[in-house]
Image: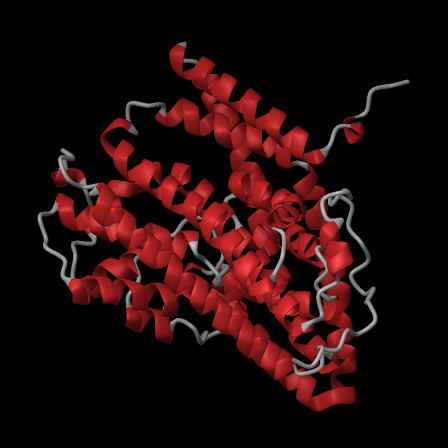
Amino acid sequence: MPFSLRKIPFSVQILLGLVLGVALGFLARTNDLSWLTTTLHTVGSLFIQLLKLAVPPLVFTAIVVSVVSLRGVTNAARLALKTLMWFGITALISVSIGIVLGLIINPGKGVTLDLGGATPPKNTGSWTDFLTGIVPTNPVGAFVEGNVLQIVFLALVFGAAAMLVGEAAEPFVALNRSLLAIVQKALWWVIRLAPIGTLGLIGNAVASYGWDLLAPLAKFTTAVYIGCAIVLFVLYPLVLVLAGRLNPLRFFAGAWPAIELAFVSRSSVGTMPVTQRSVERLGVPREYASFAVPFGATTKMDGCAAIYPALAAIFVAQVFGVHLGIGDYLLIAFVSVVGSAATAGLTGATVMLTLTLSTLGLPLAGAGLLLAIDPILDMMRTATNVAGQALVPIVVSAREGTLDRVAYESAGQRDLTEPEPVAETRPELSPVPA
């Protein structure tokens, strides 16, 4: 019988790509094979470019369709409010974990770096830029520039207007459903290339950085990974058990393909179709999942907007010898909970970091110290983001009594790499009265 890659589970394919990428990266670095490093960089970059290409139409159509679909959900306003509430609760706990971990590890103490070479990043964030940047001056420009935050704003406005207009807006809604189905189909083709993209991304990271660059920042890198791991494997399971009365092992069995893809792709939005499929197969009603997951993919960032900026602010303050007080730590928590939409689901969290640093009055050049290792950090940050984006809809559904617990307990037993028709809907599940 002829050999077929389809017979190998998708998660195993990604793992093979990861192992092979590390091996090729070390080979390129130890033997100074510039052609191999260039090849790995090109392969990884093309994969990320393909993911980014789908982001503007995917975000707009997904949010428009999800907002309109709330018409068929009982107590839609309450569900939306509870979703936001759990986003905020988990973000607040996550940033608290980051602050406590930073005070214990002290990632910037004893670190000797060339501060003269640290320059502020080109893309920086401030509260003024954040607030004024939500509303686009040119709708077309938002799509051309790939400004996800502005695209989210436009989609929410158009979706809400279409929901209120009703029948007259059906052609517009139908067009968006069709476009969403087309974009998701094309994106699934890209996702099937994830093992190859993993090989290139991981291989290039190893070949380019190795341990030489990581050594001075090893404590900070370790702190970020430990912080994200605590959120991922301690906080989230506790929330599932205490708030949803759910088995965390079943959650990870069902959500792992999305978490795994997020780790290698470094894109919450690019992972969104897999996240939504995972959430639906974990028993969340499709009408609610189609709202909560796209919304979370652009605003729910416990890795990039909670753990990372908290640790990075403490790191920068210690490197530059700036004392942080209780008020400063409260400001970090506030920025993390309120400003997480600034990360907008794209790779990297530079804007969120500079927003935090500028709010605290810390040197923006401090962000430049961390740019070199950002890809290494971003893998774990994004995996944490996506896990949180899958967690909240499940917890809300469990508390509302709409979660299919039979589907939840059998999660992880089916392949997620083949998309289902977007237009297909489940029978509406009404909340069970408390």
Residue 182 seen in this snapshot = no
The residue lying furthest to the top in this view is 31
Write down the quadrant of residue 123 in the picture: bottom left
Q: Which of the two residues, 189 or 255, is positioned nearer the viewer here?
A: 255
Q: Determine whether 259 is above or below 86 in the image.
A: above
**What residue is shown at x 14% (from left), y 43% (from top)?**
319
At x 54% / y 52%, what residue is drawn?
387
Quadrant of the image for the C terminus? bottom right
Q: What sort of colour scheme is used for the picture?
A: secondary structure
Tell how many labels. 0
Q: Quadrant of residue 135?
A: bottom left
Q: Is residue 79 visible?
A: yes
Quadrant where the image shows the N terminus: top right
Residue 173 sits in quarter:
bottom right
Q: Is residue 66 above or below residue 186?
A: below
Q: Position of residue 202 (x, y in %)?
A: 49, 29
Farthest-out residue, right: 1
Q: Is residue 217 above or below residue 63?
A: above
Percent of width and height locating residue 155: 59, 73
Q: Please report the residue visible at 65 percent of the width from the left and 66 percent of the height from the top.
A: 398
Towards the viewer: 330 or 293: 330
Residue 228 is left or right of residue 239, and the answer is: left
Residue 130 position in % (x across, y down): 35, 69
Q: Vertical placement of 87 versus 74: above or below?
A: above
Where in the figure is residue 189, as x and y percent of width and height? 72, 43
Residue closest to the eye, 268 or 142: 268
Identified at 31% across, 42% down, the residue is 371
Left or right: where does residue 241 sit relative to residue 127?
A: right
**Relative depth, front residue between 426 and 364:** 426
